[in-house]
């Protein structure tokens, strides 16, 4: 049985290394540590801080969680993250990922998250990528196992449209490569 989320939100954390000196906030469910002083949780909240990059994410997960490989829910919303770092792809059991309210500006970086086989819910709204016309189609196409995106259910019609969009863009890219 897993415990309450490890909540490091609203701690004014600028780098993930800074998180290591913080004590998680107490929530409704008590946080308990094991004999190694780690938390038996599969959820980590790092939202509403000033985190710029995810360089030390794996070290941070390892520092706080008793079973870091079982991290299923990660909240990185409302930070200053500008890239979807490949380190996220190491979190193989991740099911829910909140990245809304950051500064992510390269839409194609969403494709990296396709390496997460269990990811079924993601938030990316409130980032610069949201202004791209292909934003939702790209996300649904890159992450076919998604059930929700930006707190909205992914419909069957959206899956069909995302597949059409993907096939159309694949042809366009292929034609551009042939012409060059």
Image (cartoon, rainbow, N blue to C red):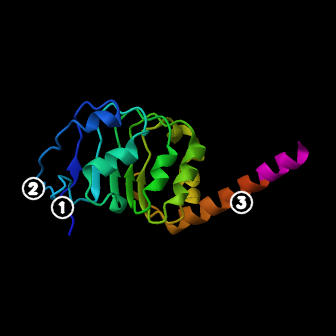
Please tell me how crowded label 2 is: few (under 14), some (14-19), or many (20+) other residues with Cα within 10 Å. few
Q: Which mark is on residue 30?
A: 2
User: x, y (%) of residue 49?
Assistant: 29, 34
Q: Which mark is on residue 167?
A: 3
Q: In this view, does 114 lie to the left or right of 48?
A: right
Q: In this view, does 2 lie to the left or right of 30?
A: right
- The first of marks 1 and 3 along the sequence is 1
Please tell me how crowded label 1 is: few (under 14), some (14-19), or many (20+) other residues with Cα within 10 Å. some
Membership of 178 in magenta stretch = yes
Q: Kindly check if marks 1 and 2 are in contact, taking CB atoms under 8 A apart as contact.
A: yes
At a point 88% along the width and 49% down the height, the residue shown is 178
Q: Kindly check if marks 1 and 3 are in contact, taking CB atoms under 8 A apart as contact.
A: no
Helix, strand or loop at disc 1? loop
Q: Mark 1 points at which residue?
A: 3
At a point 39% along the width and 61% down the height, the residue shown is 95
Q: Which mark is on residue 117?
A: none
CA gap, disc 1 and disc 3:
43 Å
Q: What stretch is highlighted in magenta?
A: 172-180
């Amino acid at each position: 049985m897993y415990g309450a989320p490890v909540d490091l939100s609203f701690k004014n954390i600028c780098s993930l290394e800074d998180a290591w000196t913080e004590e998680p906030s107490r929530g409704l469910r008590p946080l308990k540590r094991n004999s190694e002083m780690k938390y038996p949780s599969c959820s980590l909240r790092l939202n509403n801080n000033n985190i710029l990059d995810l360089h030390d994410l794996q070290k941070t997960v390892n520092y706080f969680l008793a079973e870091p490989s079982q991290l299923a829910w990660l909240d990185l919303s409302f930070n200053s993250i500008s890239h979807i770092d490949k380190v996220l792809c190491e979190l193989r059991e991740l099911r829910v990922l909140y990245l809304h309210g950051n500064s992510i500006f390269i839409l194609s970086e969403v494709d990296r998250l396709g390496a997460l086989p269990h990811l079924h819910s993601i938030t990316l709204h409130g980032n610069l990528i949201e202004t791209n016309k292909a934003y939702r189609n790209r996300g649904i196409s890159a992450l076919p196992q998604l059930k929700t995106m930006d707190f909205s259910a992914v419909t069957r019609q959206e899956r069909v449209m995302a597949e059409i969009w993907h096939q159309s863009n694949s042809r366009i890219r292929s034609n551009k490569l042939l012409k060059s």
